[in-house]
Image (tube, rainbow, N blue to C red):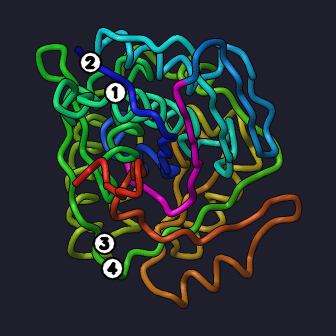
Amino acid sequence: MTGFRDGPVTVRAPATSANLGPGFDALGLALELYDDCTAQVTPGGLAISVEGDDPVPDTEQNLVVRAMHAGFDRLGARPAGLSLHCRNRIPHARGLGSSAAAIVAGVLLARALLIDGEQRLDLQAVLDLAADIEGHPDNVAACLLGGLTIAWHEDGTARAVRLDCDPRVRPVVLIPAFSSSTSAARAVLPPSVAHGDAVFNAARSALLVAALVRVPEALLAATADRLHQPFRLGAVPETQALIGRLRAADRPAVLSGAGPTVLVLARDQLEVEATLADVPDGWRALAPAVSVSGAVVTAAAALKSAGR
């Protein structure tokens, strides 16, 4: 009979930046900025505590809890009770994958709390469930697997390929005080695009993968986009102005996910330093490395990367 672990399990889930310019709903990059979630099975009830600047529910509506329940349901076993503690560092509603981190953490916690969970829910099944909860696979793939990911759906199933970035690529994120909604950012997208724009983005997406993996010198050209940023940036003029200024200065700047955070894919340390020295008032800057491991599970003194 399936049983639950007696002790706590912790998942460290990284922030992610999706799209990276032209790779809409397909490309994702894991960043070394983490949320830590620790859960333990209890005799009954639900106890939640959260550290972090952004308010989150301490009820069953908490996204980590919802993802845990989805994981338990997929595994066919729910515990009588749970305690959960989250230490949140990823800013919410800024385009840095906070919801993907919560979802991946929740599914991995459910799998790890079940003694034979890893045998019953493999990595592909984790990805597919997380993408189903999130609604698209780009952020959850990068969060789960680490590095640079290319994600897509095939016959209704989420798939992903993981690649290592060229070590010269140095992400910088510029985070504003204001937030934006992913659903609102999607609502401004047109139902169709011109054939020429589709061809443009296909070429730039292919170039972007090559630039991130082998030729960072091509990143400025590779991050050009006609599919989503021209429509989304009109709603966030401060972000639009910052991206325009950075790109005019030859820095590969894009909207991080649905925004309003700006991602600069710096090509060396000098470009990192120049970007960090040029932060607008009211914004904050971080220079997290690419998270190579992705989400990491710690249980019973055993440390394991979910993505490798």
Marks 1/3: CA distance? 46 Å
**Residue 42 position within the rendered picture, expressed as x and y whole percent measured from the top left:** 57, 22
Can residue 108 be seen?
yes
Marks 1/4: CA distance? 37 Å
Q: Secondary structure at mark 1?
A: loop
Q: Quadrant of the N terminus?
A: top left
Residue neighbourhood size for the residue with mark 2, other residues' Cα within 10 Å, grouped as few (<14), some (14–19), many (≥20): few
Mark sitting on residue 2: 2
Q: Nearer the viewer, mark 4 or mark 2?
A: 2
The kind of residue tagged 2 is Thr
Marks 2/3: CA distance? 52 Å
**Residue 120 position within the rendered picture, expressed as x and y whole percent measured from the top left:** 18, 24
Work out whether 273 lies above or below 275: below
Precedes in sequence: disc 1 or disc 4: 1
Q: Nearer the viewer, mark 2 or mark 3?
A: 2
Which image quadrant for residue 62? top right
